[in-house]
Amino acid sequence: MKYATDYANPELAARKLVELAAGVAPVQDGRIYIEKINAPFLFTHRGKGREFGAGLKFAVERGWLELHESGTYVRLKKAGEDLLAS
């Protein structure tokens, strides 16, 4: 199991978020409700809120995830899928 300190590195947090997003069935048009990755990150993997935010920002900047402007959902991008495949 990962410990919160593991996610102090935004790249590691981002990779975990991409992994979590890949494990969630999208509801519509590839949308994954943010709470479907937020809750496991915080409670199962013991990440912190600021680590979630930094990881999400990192994943969006890298093109791994797309965050809707409302903040309600994300989409797993092709680059994120490729990340998991490698």
Image (tube, rainbow, N blue to C red):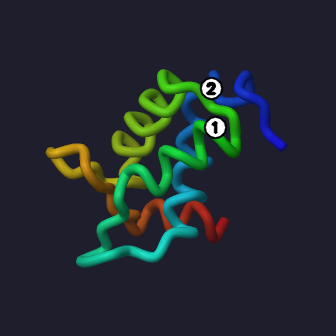
Q: Residue at x 70, y 41 (%)?
A: 45
Q: Are marks 1 and 2 in contact (CB under 8 Å)?
A: yes
- Disc ID at residue 70: none
Q: Residue at x 24, y 44 (%)?
A: 71
- Per the image, label 2 sits on a secondary structure element best described as loop
Under mark 1, the amino acid is Leu
The C terminus: image quadrant: bottom right
For residue 30, above or below residue 63: below
Quadrant location of residue 27? bottom left
Q: Residue at x 16, y 45 (%)?
A: 70
Q: State the image coordinates of residue 22 (x, y, percent, origin top left).
A: 53, 67
Residues 58 and 7: in front is 7
Q: Circle 2: is it few (<14), some (14-19), or many (20+) Cα within 10 Å?
A: few
Residue position marked by numbered label 1 in the rendering? 12
Residue position marked by numbered label 2 in the rendering? 9
Quadrant location of residue 7? top right
Q: What's the CA distance linking mark 1 and mark 2?
A: 6 Å
Q: Is residue 64 left or right of residue 6?
A: left
Under mark 2, the amino acid is Asn
